[in-house]
Image (cartoon, grey):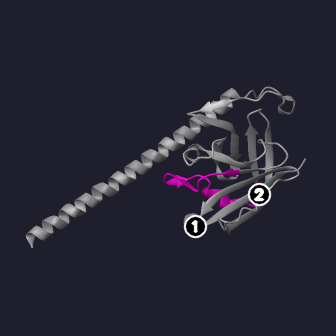
Amino acid sequence: MRRLLNILIFVLIFVLYFVTFLMIYSDFRERKLNSLEEEAVELFENKIDKKVEPSTSDKTYSISYNGYTILGVLTIPKIGLNTVILKEQTYSAMNIGAIKTYGVNLNEKGGNVISGHNFRGHGSFFYYIKNLKSGDIISITDNRGRTIEYKVYEVSRYVSPDDTSYYTRYDGYHITLVTCENGGKSRIIVKARYDE
């Protein structure tokens, strides 16, 4: 009986250490990913010449960060999101920021699809796009220094992962934000446009 009690105590201590380790690691990873994202946004903002009128700027800035190409910055004030948009369409790129998965260059007519993790590490990333409503503002600054404010007009939840109808070309300025929900079994789709 005493031996069984000692084994149970040992297992309990081991489990507590393991859970503590996972919590510390998760917190460390989240802080590291947030730090990478903040460094990338700061690098972008320091390289872009905001002194020129964006509509007259012909200069395109080539900005690299840790082997990734920064295309622009996505800002959604309502949910406190400010992140880079990366060219590379990889899982690891999505740990640093959002990725452009479809479409023309940022802030050009024709539209874009921008994807991001619902959770990155243990904390939220694109998680709160589900709270956006019609009329909310999504701002994109591209690598020419142009900033366009898009207005949300549609938020769809529980979209099938097999539904790719949002990968489409538009006549005007348009963006679509995409993230997973429900353990990857469905998607949140947010559509926004800039009315000229």
Which image quarter: residue 124? bottom right
Q: Give the image location of residue 146, x and y in percent.
A: 79, 36
138 left or right of 56 in image: left
The amino acid beneath tag 1 is Asn
Where residue 191 is drawn, which disc sits there? 2
Q: Which residue is rendered at x = 48% and y = 47% of the image?
A: 30
Count neighbours of disc 1 (C-alpha within 10 A) and say few if under 14, some if 14 to 19, many if 20 or more.
few
Magenta-colored span: 114-136
89 or 154: nearer the viewer = 89
Question: Alpha-carbon distance for marks 1 and 2?
Answer: 20 Å
Q: Is residue 185 above or below residue 107?
A: below
Asked if residue 131 lies in the magenta stretch, the reply is yes
185 or 128: nearer the viewer = 185
The amino acid beneath tag 2 is Lys
Q: Earlier in the sequence, mark 1 or mark 2?
A: 1
Q: Give the image location of residue 182, x and y in percent.
A: 57, 67
85 or 21: nearer the viewer = 85
